[in-house]
Amino acid sequence: MCGICGFNFEDKKSLLQMCDLIEHRGPDDVGYYNNSKTSIGIRRLAIIDLNTGAQPQHNEEEDIWIVFNGEIYNFTELTQQLENKGHQFYTNSDTETIIHAYEEWGEKCLNKLRGQFAFCIYDSQKKHLFLARDHMGLKPLYYYFDGEKFIFGSEIKTILCHNILREVDKNAFNLYLSLGYVPFNLTLFKGIFKLPPANYLKFDLEKKKIEVKNYWNITFNINRNKSLNQIAEELKSLIIDSVKIRLISDVPLGAFLSGGLDSSAIVGIMSELMEDPVKTFSIGFGENAASDETKYSRYVSEYYNTDHTEIIVNPSYYNLLPELVWHFDDLIADAAILPVHLMAKHAKKKMTVALTGDGADEVFAGYYYYYDPIKSKINKFLPKMLLEKTMKLYNYIPFYKLRHAISYHEQLKTKEGRYLRILLQVNDKEKSNIVPFVTKDVKSIIKSRFIDQLDIINQSINWDLKYQLPNQFNMKVDKMTMAASLEARVPFLDREIVSWASSIPPELKFKGEIEKFILRFAMKDILPQKILTRKKKGFGTPVNLWLKKALKDVTDEILERLTKRKDLVKPDFIKLVKKNKLNPKFRKLPWNLIMFEIWYETFIENMSLKPIKL
């Protein structure tokens, strides 16, 4: 894994400054290529081909250059094909494979790559930069273009070092309030965008024009002609193959283990494929937190005889938040960033690569709301007409809790509404009480991306795979592991598994009340019964417990500072949050606002590009 950056002009000093800002992504080496038309740079974390894999790399004529972040797991097979076509290689790395694949197939090379990647190719003959991001959005890539300057990087902070105007994008902030992350191509910075998953970008160096195109999509063409046993065997084979190709490494590797179905399956398969005991790492929470699952990770570790390490997180680690937000310049409000980073930091002492169980919930319907959560009993007694009239008067109701209750029951009327109720952390009708500017209806934005012919299970899966997973969960894993100079690999998000899973009947994903049914059935000969039949618990971080105890004074102070952002948030609403921040009806909003204020002070107020102090 690495960090990449660059721009469309010559400036070695600025290029190296950008590289320095992402040294954590690649502490092993730094490299660059520049001329009068372009500058590209790389910070390298050496994983494959430790001797000849330094970057940037080039083709035989040295008229095509590349900087690359990621791993291509089928590079050996592709290299053989390309050598048979006459291409000559001077390294043993997957990086050079991309160069020759691009020479041979152009942008169509992207659908031949099996892995996780973000890269930039400088083509001096075609006079353009060719940037691409992997199918599932496992690796980040951001860019800025003002009509003259085109700047890109693995992290936004590399772009910020060019002293561009720092301004909050209010449309993005609206989405952040609703979701806890910013989807699509937006970021919280006005004028800075992210390349969406499965997209490539061409920048014409002479005409100074950008072209962005999608090169792959998830399709739900359901095949009902296979038996349950046949489907299960196919899935088992796909997962084993996906894990196997991700064991290719010239440095030590291991796994993150929660004790749940997904990570346990990965560890179980690794144990069968590896000669030495798998190095596993898990997280627990102190102070009797309800979300602690260490007993299950210990059980799985003992079952497979792994080399296990357990890390206990407590509220005293809150001092790390400014540093973690600095790493999350594309802010997400997932409180699990803290335990994931601590696990990665400890794991780095023993290994450089970790396999994870992430993505299985989104691919195989692991969340209860994918199916049909129980309807609220009050809806049986509350007339539909009365509910509709009440919603029209929503903002005239003086009590927040009453407004919250009414909107909650209104959303429970349909399966789609119940899914959106889980997805949206703030009701759109509440926005006028929170922000001083006019906002777009986020619910409508999300529904506009729904596919009419899909059932509710695949409808939910489609949104989560395309938008929530790449913008929240994948970034949590990427940025918190790379902050510790550790590479994460995600077998369940192999494009072959995702494509295959989109073709199986939805009732095999969520069968009755059994989530991820087909995955459980496929893993029945690998996993112990205790794990196979375990209900999903989730990787919950005890935020409310922290806000109530160790973080109480700190969070009150941070929320008070947020009242100064009068162009973004109404001070009266912040006072309401401070008063009710432990009320479950506020859900994740207090934490999201705290994270936003730390982000604002770090990147909008602080021009030094360093973490702030609480």
Image (tube, helix red, strand yellow):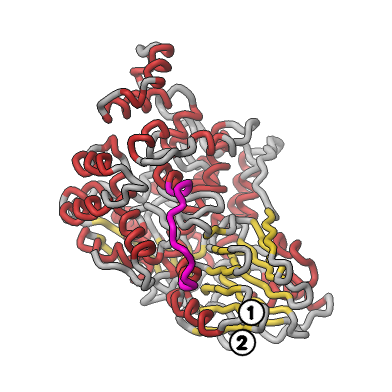
Write down the quadrant of residue 377 in the picture. top left
Q: Please tell me the numbered disc located at residue 590.
A: none
At label 2, counting other C-alpha atoms closer than 10 Å, the crowd grade (few under 14, some 14-19, many 20 or more) is few
Q: Do the numbered discs 1 and 2 sit on residues whose CB atoms are within 8 Å?
A: yes
Q: Residue furthest right?
A: 85
474, above or below 612, in the image: above
Q: Is residue 330 visible?
A: yes
Residue drawn at (52%, 53%) of the image:
186
Pick whichever of labels 1 and 2 is earlier in the sequence: 2
Write down the quadrant of residue 131 in the picture. bottom right
Reading the image, the residue beneath label 1 is: 93
The residue segment tinted magenta is 161-173
Reading the image, the residue beneath label 2 is: 52
Residue drawn at (36%, 51%) of the image:
539
Local SS, label 2: loop
390 or 116: nearer the viewer: 390
Q: Most prominent secondary structure in the magenta stretch?
A: loop
Residue drawn at (49%, 48%) of the image:
468
Q: Is residue 546 visible?
A: no
Q: Position of residue 408 (x, y in %)?
A: 37, 27
- Give, as a three-letter code, the residue at label 1: Ser
Write down the quadrant of residue 303 in the picture. bottom left
Residue drawn at (29%, 38%) of the image:
586
486 or 271: nearer the viewer: 486
53 or 395: nearer the viewer: 395
Q: Is residue 94 left or right of residue 312?
A: right
At label 1, counting other C-alpha atoms closer than 10 Å, the crowd grade (few under 14, some 14-19, many 20 or more) is many
Local SS, label 1: loop
Q: CA distance from mark 1 to mark 2?
A: 7 Å
- Give, as a three-letter code, the residue at label 2: Thr
